[in-house]
Image (cartoon, rainbow, N blue to C red):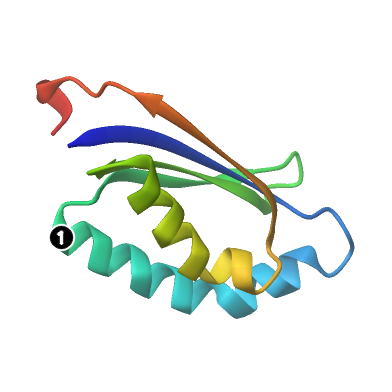
Amino acid sequence: MMNFIVNGYDFTDEKALERRMAARDAHMANIQIMKEKGQILFAAAKLNEAGNMCGSTMILEMASKEEVDSYLSMEPYIQKKVWDRVEVIPCAVPPLFK
């Protein structure tokens, strides 16, 4: 298994937060399934200066970058135009945090 940091950066238009909130239940349902499968170690919403959600960071444990890409192709925040861009960074999570 490999670890990946996934950073999602929300669009910044005036409807971005509204789209995020509309897609949030579906996003969280996917996160719950991934957690049960052991595919996600940690996740957090990024906040802007006003305290509103404006992005996401997740640490995933998956077999390959292709598996991450497969997940991202089904991610509601991508499908519903919440995330403007996503970066995937391989990383190494020590056993202490697993």
In the image, is 62 to the left or to the right of 96? right
Residue 32 spot, x, y in % from top left = 27, 67
Mark 1, residues whose alpha carbon is within 10 Å: few (<14), some, or many (≥20)?
A: few
Between residues 61 and 48, which one lies in front from this camera angle?
Answer: 61
In the image, is 57 to the left or to the right of 80? left
Residue at the disc numbered 1: 37
The residue most toward the front is 66
| 21 shown above or below 35 | below
What's the residue at 58%, 76% (across, down)?
Answer: 23
Residue 52 spot, x, y in % from top left = 68, 53
**Three-letter code for the amino acid on which mark 1 is drawn:** Lys
| 43 shown above or below 23 | above
* Numbered circles on residues, count: 1
What's the residue at 75%, 39% (across, down)?
Answer: 49
Figure quadrant of the N terminus: top left
Q: Quadrant of residue 62?
A: top left
| 44 shown above or below 2 | below
Figure quadrant of the C terminus: top left
What's the residue at 24%, 33% (across, down)?
Answer: 2
Residue 19 spot, x, y in % from top left = 71, 73
